[in-house]
Amino acid sequence: MTSAAEFFGSFLREELARVAQIERSGVGSNTIASLVVAAALQHRGIGRSLLQHLVNLYGADELRVQTAVLNVPALTLHRQSDFV
């Protein structure tokens, strides 16, 4: 089985604001391996909007998320977005 990665990012006032990495392992097997928002821009809905963009792009049924068990902000976002 082959895996490929896709990266998404956006800038705010010429600074990288957010980045996401999608690991693609085949049809119906896309994992959000990383979703990061610049520290100075957190808690403004930027990560949530990126997650929503990925859901719109891939479809909620085609996406999985992974994060560290101690990453409370990410777990909260995932729960609120119906991933957990």
Image: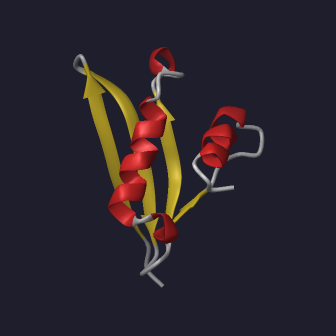
Image position of 71 (left or right of 50): right
Q: Position of residue 45 (x, y in %)?
A: 46, 28
Q: Position of residue 15 (x, y in %)?
A: 29, 21
5 in relation to 75, above or below: below
Residue 30 visible within the image: no
25 in relation to 49, above or below: below
Count of all numbered marks drawn on residues in the image? 0
Q: Nearer the viewer, residue 34 or 53?
A: 53
Q: Position of residue 74 (x, y in %)?
A: 63, 39
* Residue drawn at 67 percent across, 39 percent down: 76
What colour scheme was applied to this rendering of the protein? secondary structure
Q: Nearer the viewer, residue 80 or 23?
A: 80
Q: Residue 56, located in which quarter of the rendered image? A: bottom left
* Residue drawn at 39 percent across, 33 percent down: 18
Q: Nearer the viewer, residue 53 or 19?
A: 53
Residue 84 visible within the image: yes
Q: Position of residue 59 (x, y in %)?
A: 41, 65
Q: Nearer the viewer, residue 38 or 58?
A: 58
Q: Residue furthest right?
A: 70
Q: Quadrant of the C terminus?
A: bottom right
Q: Residue furthest left?
A: 14
74 in relation to 37, above or below: below
27 in relation to 38, above or below: below
* Residue drawn at 46 percent across, 75 percent down: 25
* Residue drawn at 47 percent across, 35 percent down: 47
